[in-house]
């Protein structure tokens, strides 16, 4: 869990100090949201399931014993 939190923190810090990258990332996020609005509400359900699945995969993979 600490690994995931530190990755989010480092990402936020990097975006805070890099305005061109922040502009590009926010543009991509805005485009994705505009696309999702066209196909709402189904696209919000699918998007939520994808985010949830990605989080489960990422956090479960790091907690397995070697």
Image (cartoon, grey):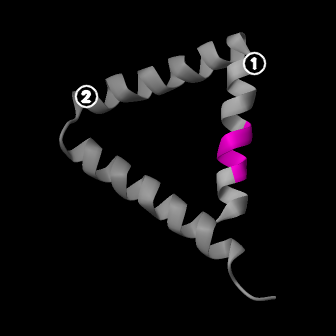
Residue at x-position 20% and y-position 36%? 40
Residue at x-position 18% and y-position 41%? 41
Q: Mark 2 or mark 1, which is nearer the start of the sequence? A: 1
Quadrant occupied by the N terminus: bottom right
Query: What is the tally of numbered marks visible in this picture?
Result: 2
Callout 1: SS: helix
Q: Which one is in front, 61 or 5? A: 5
Callout 2: SS: helix
Magenta region includes residue 16:
no
Question: Which quadrant of the figure has residue 15?
Answer: top right
Q: Provide residue 34's location: percent of width, then percent of height.
A: 33, 22
Left or right side of 51 for 19: right
Question: Which quadrant of the figure has residue 30?
Answer: top left
Magenta region includes residue 7:
yes
Q: Which residues are magenta?
A: 6-10
Q: Provide residue 51's location: percent of width, then percent of height.
A: 45, 53
Q: Is residue 55 above or below residue 46?
A: below
| Residue 17 image label | 1
Left or right side of 47 for 5: right
Quadrant occupied by the C terminus: bottom right
Q: Is residue 22 above or below residue 54?
A: above
| Front disc: 1 or 2 | 1
Q: Main secondary structure of the magenta part?
A: helix
- Reading the image, the residue beneath label 2 is 37
Q: Which residue is most to the left?
A: 41
Q: Provide residue 52's location: percent of width, then percent of height.
A: 43, 60
């Amino acid at each position: 869990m600490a690994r995931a939190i530190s990755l989010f923190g480092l990402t936020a810090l990097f975006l805070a100090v890099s305005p061109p990258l922040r502009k590009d990332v926010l543009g991509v996020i805005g485009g994705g949201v505009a696309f999702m609005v066209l196909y709402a509400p189904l696209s919000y359900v699918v998007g939520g399931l994808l985010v949830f699945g990605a989080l489960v995969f990422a956090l479960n993979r790091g907690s397995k014993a070697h």
